[in-house]
Image (cartoon, rainbow, N blue to C red):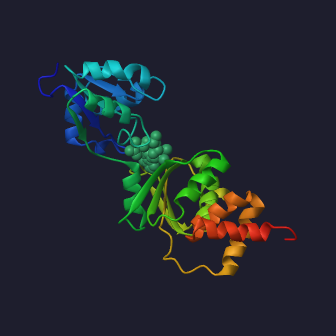
Amino acid sequence: MSDRLLPGLYIVATPIGNLSDLSPHAASVLAAADLLAVEDSRVTAKLLAHIGVKRPMTPYHDHNADRVRPGLVAEMAHKAIALVSDAGTPLISDPGYKLVREARAAGRHVTTVAGPCAAVAALTLAGLPTDRFLFLGFLPAKAGARAAAIAEVAAIKATLILYESGPRLAATLQALHQGLGDRDAAVVREISKKFEESVTERLSVLAARYAEQPPKGEIVIVVGPPAPAEPADERSIDDALAEAMRRLPVSRAAAEVAAMLGLPRRRVYERALALSGPGK
Ligand code: SAM
C-alpha cells in the first residue's frame, strides 16, 4: 500500500492535448497510487513516461467494466486506486460513474483530482453564452435517433455542448441546423494542441464549410441558446410544418416544430393534422 495516499478511489483528470496541462496534484496522485485503472494502458504509459514514473495498470473500459468493477471496489479497501481515461476528465463521455457509485455504496474514500475537460475548454473558446449550458455528449449516429435527440433539447434555453468526430461533423451540423434553426455555433478543434482552432458562425455556414472540407482531429460543437422567442405567426408554423412533414410522420413533425418554435405540442399537432387532412 502507498505511504502517502489513503486507500480509496482517486478520479484523476489528464491532459486533452498538451501533456504539460497535467497538474502537479494529478502527477503526485498518479505517482503514489497503488494501481491505475486505465482505458488504454498504451496511452497512460505515455503520460507516466512524461512524468517519469511507472505504476501497475489494470484495464477499466466499456467492455470489461461490469466484470472487473466488484474486484476493484474490494481492492479499494486497502489500495489507493486512480481512475484515468485516455484524455480529460474520467466519467465525462468516458467510463466511471458506476465505479464511483459502487465505491461510495461500499463506504470507500472517493475523491477527485479536477483538471482538463474538452467540453468546458470548448465553452471557454466559443464566444457563446456561458451562464447556462447543457452537455449532450455524442449524439446517436443514426439520422432518425439523432433528429429525435436534437428535437428533445430544441426548446431549452441554454448553450449546448456536443462531442463529435470529423467524418460525422457536417451531417451533425446539418441536423442541428434543421432541428434548432440557424443559431450561432462554434466548431472547436484540437484544443491545447498545435492546430487548435475555434470557428464561430451560423450553423448553416458551418454545415456548408465542413461538408466541403471534413476536418481532422478532435472536435467539440458548441451551439448558442435559442433567440428570445418572438411569438410565431401562423404562416411560419405552417411553413415549418410543411417542411418537417416532407421528412417525418405527422406526430414527429409536429413535435419537432413545437420544440423548434417553443410552442405547445398539442397546438402544433392539431395544425399539422389540419394541414395533412383530406384534400390537403
Ligand atoms: N473525458 C473527456 C473529456 O473530459 O473531455 C472526453 C472523452 S470523449 C471519449 C472524447 C471526445 O472529447 C472527442 O471525440 C472529442 O469530441 C472531445 N475531445 C477530447 N479532446 C479534445 C481536444 N483536445 N479538442 C477537441 N475535442 C476534444
Q: Residue 199: percent from the left, percent from the top? A: 50, 63
Residue 214 visible in image = no
**Residue closer to the observer: 210 or 141:** 141
Q: Nearer the viewer, residue 62 or 268?
A: 268
Residue located 67% across and 77% down the image: 236
In the rendering, at what x and y percent does residue 35 appear? 27, 22
Which of the 4 image quadrants contains residue 30?
top left
User: Where 185 falls versus 237 (above or below)?
Assistant: above
Relative to residue 126, is residue 66 depicted above or below? above
Picture coordinates of residue 13, whole percent (x, y): 31, 40
Q: Kindly indicate the quadrant of the structure image that contains residue 279.
A: bottom right
At a point 50% along the width and 74% down the height, the residue shown is 227
Q: From the viewer's perspective, tell me whether residue 60 is left or right of residue 201.
A: left
Image quadrant of ligand 1? top left
Residue at the farthest left position: 3
Query: Residue 186 appears at what percent x and percent y?
Result: 49, 62
Q: Is residue 123 left or right of residue 229?
A: left
Q: Residue at x 30, y 26 (%)?
A: 36
- Above or below, comparing residue 65 to residue 209 in the picture: above
Is residue 26 positioned above or below 247 on the image?
Answer: above
